């Protein structure tokens, strides 16, 4: 049991940090601009593909920096020439715009890179074993993912809470007219926030693309779960996104790692493995795991609509 | 006004007639078309893509030799996104386009829906029947309780593969104490999980099944939680019917966690898995197949080796993997040539029934009773010394057990309804 808990925590934290990298940008954009960006996971995908393509020429380490910048630039263009025009019509058109954008990006990626997964791999140096826990090896790449996520969280926190830029961003959120009157270019602030949020997703893609698979389906695979994280953590809250990511990561991994069903632990009690209740009684934890995040989403919306750390209703 | 109406009627009739005539001539002189209904996007796109390359290559090679009855073979690729309902629609589209043959293999759940759709179409639409050639969906139900006159399977059914696998595992009894089953959560994986446990008892294997896990199809991107379960169970042997990414990611996770287990697979020899594990899979990763590249070397099959090499020249990034596509295409050709046309589906199906074909690996027979092919099988294990490595991974396969046709046969309960 100790082993199971240790694995679940480590693997779960790893998965959770990847979720955090993807969701921090989304929650930031929502918190600052009120835009629920359906295309967020698409920027995550672009990050992976850019890193793969740049990596062919420059190697992984340069691509690690170039790819998020490129994704950020794309995000800025989308905000400046797409979202800003739609913004005046309200939030629903914005939502529909990003929804369509997600499909456009997916099709474009399939056109440029093909529908088959690309061979995007970690550099050899990171593929070596870092440490062994209860007989299972963990590579340096996994440690690297953790480090990137920690650096990202600290960087974000310092940026928003401790710098002048963060102050202006927070001001522009709640009192845009006042910040504008003080001589700041509010639309520019919005563009930068959107670009920055996309770049964060891009960075998530650079490491996530290696850890998972880089194919045109990766955005739609990750899209729903990222929303779960953001809702659970509270829309707009970066610490909330971190906590929610870790909760989902650990919980899901734990359910996958244990051999558990009500029938096994309490006893079959003569209940047949058929019918609604019987199936539920004999259901193994492994098979519940995929539905777990969405169950959390529904429960959060029912019992605590503003999420764990959110300040307003979802 | 009246004049105009008449002219219109006349023109309309003529256009209709000429279209009808052209479609008839097209049907009889144009290429023989086969719909290839597989995932060309989504998590299994790479699998669909490789199969398509195999079919296109085989068609091209056969067209060079004069095609079938002097007509070219054309493969029409259709993307079913790995969805049963999309596949059913694509069968309808094939029928509408006048295509008489459909082929599919990935996913027995998809295959099950397709068998039903083909049967329904052939019952209601007697003039536009279609024949379903299954090159990879291995759920035994398709040739047992759900068998159909219009369905032919060119791959060994899952029960045949498991039979061969467990016979071999019996000879390795000393190395095998604890078996862990990990499979995809649909009919295919569920069958393996159920049947493998029965076989452990039936064959008297001196081993126990210590784990049995189902995971969602094409959804799992990180198998490390599953790997930690394998590790905790203390298993020394893993049996999996996974395919595509679900196998390559599983094997990669086992490898990167440094877990020392033997892995018995159906599809370890291609479709991304050799590249995922590389030479570290040597003497560990096994597969049960109807052929692998070094069979050509072992048995001196020079013509087939040339076929293999030409495929490699065309598609350097992958290898010829589906020997059953070779069998399927050549047997279809033989059946159509026996009938003398490519339109009479009932006659072609009858010609395929019981057909014996001299495949490079030996004589293969399409069992008339259930339309299951019976063919020699090979159990092989990864070996860096193999002449041909798979998918440029630096590791190929070495045969560890030849399974003659007689042993690669399992009885059927099929009670087929015939026209």
Image: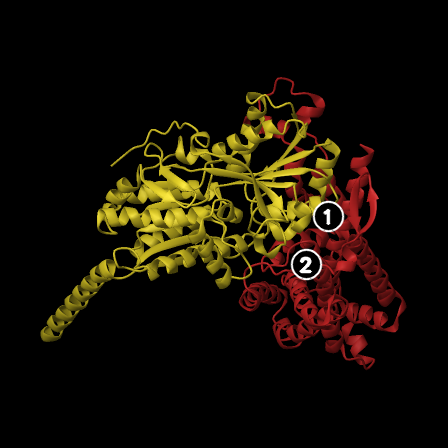
Quarter of the figure that contains the C terminus of chain B: top left
- Badge 1 crowding class, 10 Å Cα cut-off, few under 14, some 14 to 19, many 20 or more, is some
**Of A161 and A222, the residue lying toward us:** A222
Q: Residue furthest right?
A: A162
Q: What number is the disc on residue B239?
A: none
Residues at circles 2 and 1 in contact by the CB criterion of under 8 Å:
no
Q: Is residue B76 left or right of residue B350?
A: right
Question: Marks 2/1: CA distance?
Answer: 17 Å
The local secondary structure at tag 2 comes to helix
Where residue B348 appears, as percent x and y from the top left, is 27, 45
Quadrant of the frame with the N terminus of chain B:
bottom left
**Viewer can see residue A236:** no
- Colouring style: by chain
Residue position marked by numbered label 2 in the rendering = A209
Which mark, by number, is residue B256?
1
Q: Residues within 10 Å of mark 2 (few under 14, many from 20)?
A: many
Q: Which chain is red?
A: A
| Chain depicted in yellow | B
Most distant residue in the bottom direction: A183
On screen, residue A179 above or below B390 = below
Helix, strand or loop under label 1: helix
Q: Is residue A260 left or right of residue B366?
A: right
Which residue is rendered at x = 30% and y = 51% of the image?
A: B100
Residue drawn where x is 79% and y is 48% of the image = A138
Residue drawn 80% across the image and 39% down it: A135
Answer yes or no: are tags 2 and 1 on the same subunit. no
Number of the front mark, 2 or 1: 1
């Amino acid at each position: 049991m100790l082993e199971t808990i240790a694995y679940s925590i480590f693997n779960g934290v790893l998965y959770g940090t990847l979720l955090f990298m993807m969701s921090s940008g989304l929650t930031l954009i929502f918190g600052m601009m009120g835009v629920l960006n359906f295309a967020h996971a698409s920027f995550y995908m672009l990050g992976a593909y850019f890193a793969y393509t740049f990596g062919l020429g420059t190697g992984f380490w340069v691509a690690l920096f170039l790819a998020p910048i490129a994704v950020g630039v794309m995000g800025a263009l989308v905000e400046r020439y797409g979202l800003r025009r739609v913004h005046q019509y309200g939030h629903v058109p914005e939502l529909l715009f990003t929804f369509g954008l997600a499909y456009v990006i997916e099709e474009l990626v399939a056109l440029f890179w093909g529908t088959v997964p690309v061979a995007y791999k970690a550099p050899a140096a990171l593929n070596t074993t870092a440490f062994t826990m209860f007989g299972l090896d963990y590579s340096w790449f996994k440690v690297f993912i953790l480090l990137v996520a920690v650096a990202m969280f600290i960087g974000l926190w310092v940026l928003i809470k401790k710098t002048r830029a963060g102050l202006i961003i927070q001001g522009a959120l709640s009192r845009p007219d006042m910040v504008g009157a003080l001589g700041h270019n509010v639309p520019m602030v919005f563009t930068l926030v959107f670009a920055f949020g996309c770049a964060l997703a891009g960075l998530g893609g650079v490491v996530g693309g290696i850890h998972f698979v880089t194919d045109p389906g990766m955005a739609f695979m990750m899209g729903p779960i990222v929303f779960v994280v953001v809702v659970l953590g509270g829309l707009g809250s970066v610490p909330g996104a971190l906590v929610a990511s870790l909760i989902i990561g650990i919980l899901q991994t734990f359910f996958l790692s244990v051999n558990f069903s009500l029938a096994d632990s309490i006893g079959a009690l003569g209940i047949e493995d058929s019918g609604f209740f019987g199936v539920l009684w004999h259901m193994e934890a492994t098979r519940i795991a995929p539905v777990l995040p969405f169950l959390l989403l529904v429960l959060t919306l029912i019992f605590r609509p503003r999420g764990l750390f959110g300040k307003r209703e979802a | 006004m009246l004049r105009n109406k008449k002219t219109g009627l006349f023109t309309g009739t003529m256009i209709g007639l000429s279209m009808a005539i052209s479609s008839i001539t097209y049907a009889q002189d144009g290429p023989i078309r086969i719909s290839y209904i597989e995932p060309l996007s989504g998590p299994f796109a790479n699998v669909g893509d490789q199969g398509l390359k195999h079919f296109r290559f085989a068609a091209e090679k056969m067209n060079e030799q004069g095609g079938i009855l002097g007509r070219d073979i054309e493969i029409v690729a259709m993307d079913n996104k790995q969805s049963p309902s999309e596949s059913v629609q694509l069968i309808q589209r094939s029928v509408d386009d006048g295509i008489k043959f459909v082929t599919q293999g990935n996913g027995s759940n998809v295959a099950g829906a397709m068998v039903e759709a083909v049967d329904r179409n052939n019952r209601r639409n007697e003039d536009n029947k279609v024949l379903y050639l299954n090159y990879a969906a291995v759920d035994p139900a398709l040739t047992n309780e759900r068998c159909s006159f219009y369905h032919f399977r060119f791959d060994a059914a899952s029960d045949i593969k498991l039979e061969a696998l467990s016979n071999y595992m019996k000879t390795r009894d000393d190395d095998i104490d604890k078996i862990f089953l990990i499979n995809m959560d649909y009919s295919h994986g569920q069958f393996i999980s159920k049947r493998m446990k029965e076989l452990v008892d039936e064959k008297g294997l001196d081993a126990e099944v210590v784990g049995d896990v189902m995971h969602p199809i094409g959804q799992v991107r990180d198998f490390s939680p599953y790997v930690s379960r394998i590790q905790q169970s203390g298993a020394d042997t893993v049996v999996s019917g996974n395919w595509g990414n679900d196998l390559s990611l599983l094997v990669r996770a086992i490898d990167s966690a440094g877990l020392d287990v033997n892995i018995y697979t159906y599809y370890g020899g291609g479709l991304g898995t050799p590249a995922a594990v590389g030479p570290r899979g040597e003497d560990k990763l096994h597969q049960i197949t109807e052929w692998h590249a070094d069979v050509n070397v072992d048995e001196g099959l020079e013509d087939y080796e040339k076929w293999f090499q030409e495929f490699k020249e065309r598609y350097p990034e992958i290898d010829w993997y589906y020997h059953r596509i070779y069998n399927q295409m050549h047997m279809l050709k033989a059946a159509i040539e026996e009938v003398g046309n490519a339109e009479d589906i009932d006659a072609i199906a009858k010609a395929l029934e019981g057909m014996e074909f001299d495949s490079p690996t030996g004589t293969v027979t399409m069992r008339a009773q259930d339309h299951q092919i019976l063919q020699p099988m090979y159990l092989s294990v990864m070996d860096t010394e193999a002449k041909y490595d798979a998918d440029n991974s630096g590791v190929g396969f070495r045969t560890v057990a030849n399974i003659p046709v007689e042993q690669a046969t399992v009885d059927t309960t099929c009670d087929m309804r015939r026209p």
